[in-house]
Image: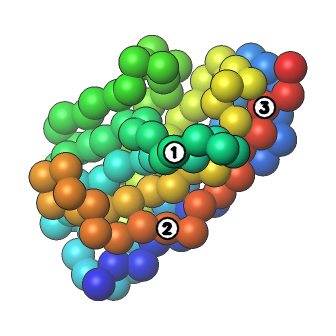
């Protein structure tokens, strides 16, 4: 069992930056691939980024490629999402998730990101 708690969301203007954090507890954080997902009002949850257990490989959705950076610190049991040049369409609840391969079994409660135009 892994418990995940996101933080770092907020209300920002277009073009601003935010860094989300996801603190993990429970089973060994470094045993899991990690991902960020988001869900905007009235829309389905969508993939944002993922990172392998060691942090050696990352992947991004086309909509955030070049603006967002996923990273992890296994010594601190923490996952990060650096978000730059934010746009109103980035407004959503952001969730972190832990899993094996691309199957995510554990989810956080989410943190709200709102980007005003």
Compared to residue 38, the image places residue 7 above or below, namely below
Label 2 Cα crowd, 10 Å radius (few <14 / some 14-19 / many 20+) = some
Q: Residue sitting at 85 percent across and 28 percent down?
A: 116
Q: Position of residue 111 (x, y in %)?
A: 65, 57
Residue of label 2: 108
Q: Position of residue 114 (x, y in %)?
A: 77, 39
**SS at circle 2:** loop
* Quadrant in the picture for residue 97: bottom left
Query: How does the figure colour the protein chain or chains?
Result: rainbow
Label 3 Cα crowd, 10 Å radius (few <14 / some 14-19 / many 20+) = many
Residue of label 1: 44
* Quadrant in the picture for residue 92: top right
State which quarter of the image contains the N terminus: bottom left
Q: How many angstroms separate mark 2 from mark 3 (CA)?
A: 21 Å
Q: Which residue is nearer to you in this view: 111 or 72?
A: 111
Residue of label 3: 115
Q: How many angstroms separate mark 3 from mark 1 (CA)?
A: 19 Å
Q: Residue sitting at 45 percent across and 15 percent down?
A: 66
Label 1 Cα crowd, 10 Å radius (few <14 / some 14-19 / many 20+) = few
Compared to residue 5, the image places residue 20 above or below, namely above
From the image, state whether disc 1 or disc 2 is nearer to you. Answer: 1
């Amino acid at each position: 069992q892994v418990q995940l708690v996101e933080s770092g969301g907020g209300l920002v203007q277009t073009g601003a930056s935010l860094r989300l954090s996801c603190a993990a507890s429970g089973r060994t954080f470094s045993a899991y691939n990690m991902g960020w997902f988001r869900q905007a009002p009235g829309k389905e949850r969508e993939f944002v980024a993922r990172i392998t257990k060691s942090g050696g490989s990352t992947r991004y959705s086309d909509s955030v490629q070049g603006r967002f950076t996923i990273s992890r610190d296994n010594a601190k049991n923490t996952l990060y999402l650096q978000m730059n040049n934010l746009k109103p369409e980035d407004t959503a609840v952001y969730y972190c998730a832990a899993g094996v391969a691309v199957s995510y079994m554990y989810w956080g409660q989410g943190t709200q990101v709102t980007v005003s135009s």
